[in-house]
Amino acid sequence: MKRQIIALVATAAACALAGSVSATEFITNGNFETGNLTGWTSANIGQGGWAVMGNGDNTPITGTSTPTLSGGGDFIATTDQRSPGVFDLSQTLLLAGGAYVFSFDARGNNESSSGAFVDQEYIVKVDGLTIAGPIIDPNWNHFSFNLDLGAGLHTLAFHEDAEESLYQAGVDNVSLTSGGVPEPATWALMIGGFGLVGATLRRRKTLTV
């Protein structure tokens, strides 16, 4: 009987733990639903650069048509310009280190007269190293990467280098998560369950004396 009680409580605790583990999100305003670049650092060299616009609206400078991102909310982030330039959108995060999942939706639309992608690219970097790109599809695509990052500061950057101008780099739903940890309610359930086991065992011992 004692073993059965312990097994039942352990099983219930395991089920509760599995059902209530939540991942920690480290990106601020990754879906841009603030309607602006809050939480992000935008560094633009040239006319134009990164901005937030309505999901599916035309770009703010050149008026280029932008496809709607399903599940993208009301806003996306995009670059738009009429002249060559270099445009970065980044966040620097202080992390404890470990395994992380980095994901985002992105598009790259080349509107230059030549249509060439030589020296015109849109890439995604982690700590200065390219992990995605060149992104050259004008339609939205989802990207996801498993990263092993050490403790300390890390920078995630969306980088456009437009040598020929008229290029739109888009991004939305940016996320960086780590493994989940039990929620407070789960810990309370587990502690209560093991307390019940102890009380039951004490009662059985008293009855058998």
Image: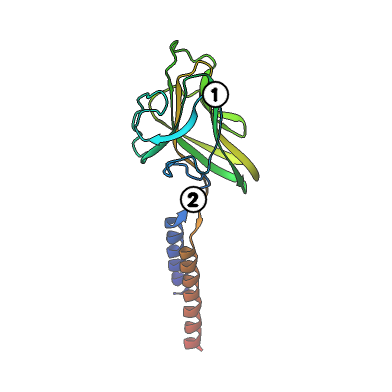
Give me the disc on residue 23.
Answer: 2
Of 159 and 131, the residue lying toward us: 159
Percent x, y for residue 79? 47, 28
The residue at 46%/63% (across/down) is 186
The residue at 61%/47% (across/down) is 95
Residue 97 visible? The answer is: yes
Color encoding of the figure: rainbow
Question: Are there few (<14), some (14-19), or many (20+) residues within 10 Å of tag 1?
Answer: some
- Name above or below for residue 193 compared with residue 93: below
Circle 1/circle 2 CB separation < 8 Å:
no
- Looking at numbered disc 1 in the image, what kind of residue is underneath it? Gly
Residue 150 visible? The answer is: no
- Looking at numbered disc 2 in the image, what kind of residue is underneath it? Ala
In the picture as drawn, the residue positioned furthest to the top comes out as 114
Q: What distance separates the C-alpha of mark 1 from that of mark 2?
A: 38 Å
Q: Secondary structure at mark 1?
A: loop
**Mark 1 vs mark 2: in front:** 1
**Which residue is denoted by mark 1 in the rendering?**
46
Of 146 and 3, the residue lying toward us: 146
Question: Are there few (<14), some (14-19), or many (20+) residues within 10 Å of tag 2?
Answer: some
The residue at 50%/59% (across/down) is 182
Quarter the N terminus occupies? bottom left
Percent x, y for residue 40? 53, 40
- Name above or below for residue 53 compared with residue 47: below
Percent x, y for residue 8? 43, 67
Give me the disc on residue 31.
Answer: none
- Name above or below for residue 204 compared with residue 128: below
The residue at 50%/84% (across/down) is 205
Percent x, y for residue 144? 47, 36
Please tell me which of labels 1 and 2 falls first in the chain. Answer: 2
Of 113 and 204, the residue lying toward us: 113
Q: Secondary structure at mark 2?
A: loop
